[in-house]
Image: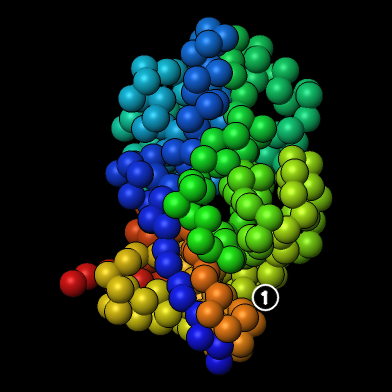
Amino acid sequence: MSRVSLDIKREDLLHPFVSGNKFRKLKYNLAEFTKLGYDSLVTFGGAFSNHIAATAYACSENHINCVGVIRGEELPPLINENQTLKFAQQNGMKFEFVSRTLYREKDSESFKEYLKSKYGNCFILPEGGSNLLAVKGCEEILTENDAQYDFICCPVGTCATITGIINSTLPHQKVIGFPALKGDFLKDEIRKFARNNNWELNTDYHFGGYGKVNDQLIDFLNCFYKETSIKLDPVYTGKMAFGIIDLIQQGYFPENAKVLMIHTGGLQGVEGMNRYLEQKKMKKIDFNE
């Protein structure tokens, strides 16, 4: 095992409700909304989406009408049992629940026209808040204080975060992304806006795909918290941290390498995950002192 230093950049501490990469992604999108004078903001997500919760709060803070197009037409009666949707609703978000089949059409022009016909002059923000303005915001994650690091590691969902980080790296730095989803298709998404080629995706730590967990990952999250007092979420940052530590133990990083792990937030989803784990009679995430 190589001797490596590992630091964590606590983007999760940026804001109590709009934390981590959500803060970065929304920054310029909300500025654009205000600049162009839209009437409402429409965005997309699942029942436990960090993006939905963060957008609802940010819009409430900025007095913006917002609508969440939510995947799952069976969800309306369950809002009060779902902490993410309940939080979003309490912060003023209106919901448009659609079937999973229709949700797959969310990026089509016909669906966008439907939204405009229903919600008027609306600003349509993609799932996860990911677009060129989001990438611009994520380019501000790294600062001149991070120039000392050789490797920058981050979780990958809709690719705006890693793309912004790639664009702000220095020539001696390499970015490693840890996808929360199965498949290799994310590379094409990154290439759309990435200006550097100093990156790779490690697809060995998705634990079965988006939102999938097992006892090994839960044990890791609980142990990591006990040893560091840092909470990691099970969908994104937990899988990344597991992967980084496993790679260190395998000797992947060169001797004396300096590694920076980006904590992108996402902790609001822990309660929902624990409810799921309880239903499945699996181990739960325990962040109690």
Between residues 144 and 160, which one lies in front from this camera angle? Answer: 144
Between residues 89 and 55, which one lies in front from this camera angle? Answer: 55
In the image, residue 261 above or below residue 13: below
The answer to whether residue 81 is seen in the rendering is no
Residue drawn at x 33%, y 30% is: 91
Please state the horizontal and vertical placement of residue 25, each as a whole percent of the image: 53, 37
Name the residue beneath numbered marker 1: 204
Quarter occupied by the N terminus: bottom right
Residue drawn at x 59%, y 19% is: 123
Q: Quadrant of residue 107?
A: top right
Q: Would residue 226 be found to the left or right of residue 128 on screen?
A: left
Quarter occupied by the C terminus: bottom left
Please state the horizontal and vertical placement of residue 120, each as a whole percent of the image: 59, 10
Please state the horizontal and vertical placement of residue 99, each as a whole percent of the image: 65, 41
Q: Would residue 16 be found to the left or right of residue 39 on screen?
A: left
Circle 1 — which element?
loop
Q: Would residue 51 be found to the left or right of residue 99 on screen?
A: left
The answer to whether residue 133 is seen in the rendering is yes
Please name the amino acid that badge 1 sits on.
Asp
Q: Residues within 10 Å of mark 1 (few under 14, many from 20)?
A: few
Please state the horizontal and vertical placement of residue 9, each as a whole percent of the image: 42, 57
In the image, residue 199 above or below residue 129: below
Q: Quadrant of residue 29?
A: top right
Between residues 230 and 248, which one lies in front from this camera angle? Answer: 248
In the image, residue 59 above or below residue 196: above
Residue drawn at x 66%, y 60% is: 172
List the single residue furthest toward the bottom: 1
Residue drawn at x 52%, y 40% is: 140
Q: Would residue 168 be found to the left or right of residue 49 on screen?
A: right
In the image, residue 200 above or below residue 108: below
List the single residue furthest toward the left: 289
